[in-house]
Amino acid sequence: MSLLDWLASLQRRRHGFEPVVATRPERPGWAWRAVLDGVLVATSGRTYQRQREAAYAYQQFAVHLPAAVVDDRLLQQVLRGRTRRRASGVR
């Protein structure tokens, strides 16, 4: 399955997401996660000072997911760049 197919699958199945808003043990603050069939499929890229801010950010993610568009070429470049950085010890 390509990454674009995976995104399309998430868009179709978004109503089955279980939103989780919780604190993270490794960082102070609140974060959100989207779980589908017991699998983590999305998470906030930052933490929030308040639980309601994290919940609102998840709601915004859920609202905008259906319109999300990913350029597969750009995504492949990003993934290749991450692979190179990890191989060189840079994270």
Image: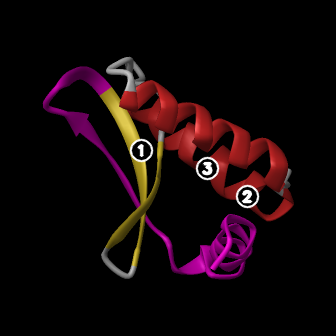
The image's mark for residue 56 is none
Residue identified by numbered label 2: 65
User: Alpha carbon of mark 1 to alpha carbon of mark 3: how far?
Assistant: 10 Å
User: Alpha carbon of mark 1 to alpha carbon of mark 2: how far?
Assistant: 15 Å
Residue 42 screen position, x and y as percent: 49, 54
Three-letter amino acid code of the residue under disc 1: Trp
Q: Which of the two labelled residues, at mark 2 and mark 3, occupies the earlier sequence position?
A: 3
- For mark 1, give the secondary structure: strand
Three-letter amino acid code of the residue under disc 2: Leu
Three-letter amino acid code of the residue under disc 3: Gln
Residues under numbered marks 2 and 3 in contact, where contact means CB atoms less than 8 Å apart: no
Please provide the residue range marked out in magenta: 1-29
- For mark 2, give the secondary structure: helix
The image's mark for residue 59 is 3
The image's mark for residue 32 is 1
Left or right: 34 in relation to 10: left
Residue 38 screen position, x and y as percent: 31, 76
